Image: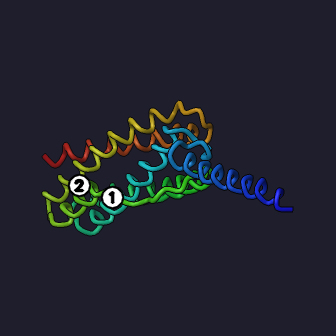
Amino acid sequence: MKKLIYPVLGLAFVLSVQSCMDNYKAKYLQEKTLTDDVGVSLIHNGLEGGMTEIKASSLAATNSQNPDVKSFAQMMITDHTKADSTLLWIESDKLLTENDTISGEHQVMIDSLSKKTGADFDKAYLAMMVKDHEGAVELFEEASDDKNQTIQDFARATLPTIEMHLDKAKELAATLK
């Protein structure tokens, strides 16, 4: 019986170490997730960008005096809320466990935006929307060729909306100058 205990304990130890390594690989190498680095980037950056734009657009919906900016802000809230709910589903479906929060850089932008009023607010808000959407277009274009079909389909379906947001933000920003 004593001779059997050591091999069993050894096997249990090896299996537990292997199990820990699987979790490490899943977190850092996406081996246990169902997507690659491009997909992880789309999900993480898409959610973070969406949350940022919803927060900034909520400020614009209440702080702007320009009806066109208010209308744009409401469109941003609606479209990004819908996209974020889909991204959250994809995140769960692809076995990702991300901490979805607004980055420090974006929080500084939102804090700065909240201190502005009138035309200065509108200009800063639209400049933020142009910058963020230019980055989002690049991200979604890259993900449009992803190996994972779900990521690819979402990126391809969402890219025209993001491009429309970018064009509208540029158009509105030009009218404010």
The quarter of the picture where residue 174 lies is top left
Q: How many labels, in total?
A: 2
The residue pinned by badge 1 equals: 73
- Which color scheme is applied? rainbow
Q: Are marks 1 and 2 in contact (CB under 8 Å)?
A: yes
Give the residue at x 33% y 58%: 73
- Pick whichever, 132 or 70, lies toward us: 132
How far from the left and from the top, in percent, is residue 103?
A: 32, 56
Residue 75, how many percent across, how many down?
A: 39, 56
Element on which disc 2 rests: helix
Looking at the picture, does residue 144 appear above or below residue 46? above
Mark 1 or mark 2, earlier in chain = 1
Q: Which residue corresponds to the image point at 28% horizontal and 55% vertical from the top-left?
A: 106
Q: x and y percent of residue 7 in the render?
A: 78, 53
Dot 1 crowding, Cα within 10 Å, few <14, some 14–19, many 20+ = many
| Residue depicted at x 39% and y 59% | 51
Q: Is residue 101 above or below residue 25?
A: below
Name the residue beneath numbered marker 2.
125
- Taking the view exactly as shown, the residue that stands out farthest to the top is 145
